Image (spheres, helix red, strand yellow):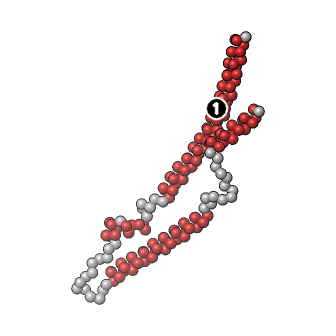
Amino acid sequence: DAISKEIAALEAGNAALTKHAKELQADNALMRLELESLQASLASAGSYASETLAQTDDSHAEALSVLDPKAAAEETPPPAKKHHHGHHDHGKAWLMESSSRAALDDAAEADAEADGAADDAQDDDYDAEDSAAESFLSVAHSARLRATARRQ
């Protein structure tokens, strides 16, 4: 009779361990789904970062050449001749060219700012169609509650 009680206790213990193992298995499956989702999000974020870095590379932009000391030295006006009166065409031409280039740069910058504002207006960071993201813990908790309810 003592052996029967011990066998019954072991069977009950085994049943409890089996139940716990199945719960762990279900939790593990949920964690794997969460990790797969996270992996896809990280891949997307990495791709976005790479594309953005490539698109915003201004290291070869002509408009920024004015910041380069070598380029600025090449664009300085020729020295004025002291003894030559009446002909200042070289200095005036350089000044007009520089003014024209600055006006074009300003116009390009204004266009870029307008494009940026239009892009910002089109962004839809959050709207009524967006759903709240569920954390792994809330998903696991919901799954446990559903599994418990099915068993009862």
Query: Is the residue 14 above or below the residue 62 in the image?
Result: above
Instruction: Tell me: 37 left or right of 57.
Output: right
Instruction: Tell me: 34 left or right of 12.
Output: left
Q: Position of residue 80 (x, y in %)?
A: 27, 81
Q: Position of residue 113 (x, y in %)?
A: 52, 69
Q: Position of residue 149 (x, y in %)?
A: 75, 36
Q: In the picture, residue 100 is in which quadrant?
A: bottom left
Tell me the residue at 65%/28% (across/down): 21
Label 1 Cα neighbours within 10 Å, binned few <14 / some 14-19 / many ≥20? few
Tell me the quadrant of the picture where the N terminus can be found: top right
Tell me the residue at 64%/47% (across/down): 134
Tell me the quadrant of the picture where the C terminus can be found: top right
Query: Is the residue 56 above or below the residue 63 in the image?
Result: above
Tell me the residue at 60%/61% (across/down): 123
Residue reaching furthest to the bottom: 86
Tell me the residue at 54%/66% (across/down): 116
Q: In the picture, residue 136 is in which quadrant?
A: top right
Q: Nearer the viewer, residue 81 or 63?
A: 63
Q: Nearer the viewer, residue 20 or 50?
A: 20
Residue reaching furthest to the front: 2
SS for dot 1? helix
Query: Is the residue 41 above or below the residue 145 in the image?
Result: below
Q: In the picture, residue 127 is in which quadrant?
A: bottom right
Q: Nearer the viewer, residue 56 or 148?
A: 148
Q: Position of residue 38 (x, y in %)?
A: 58, 44
Question: Label 1 is placed on what type of residue?
Answer: Leu
Where is mark 1, residue-wise?
24
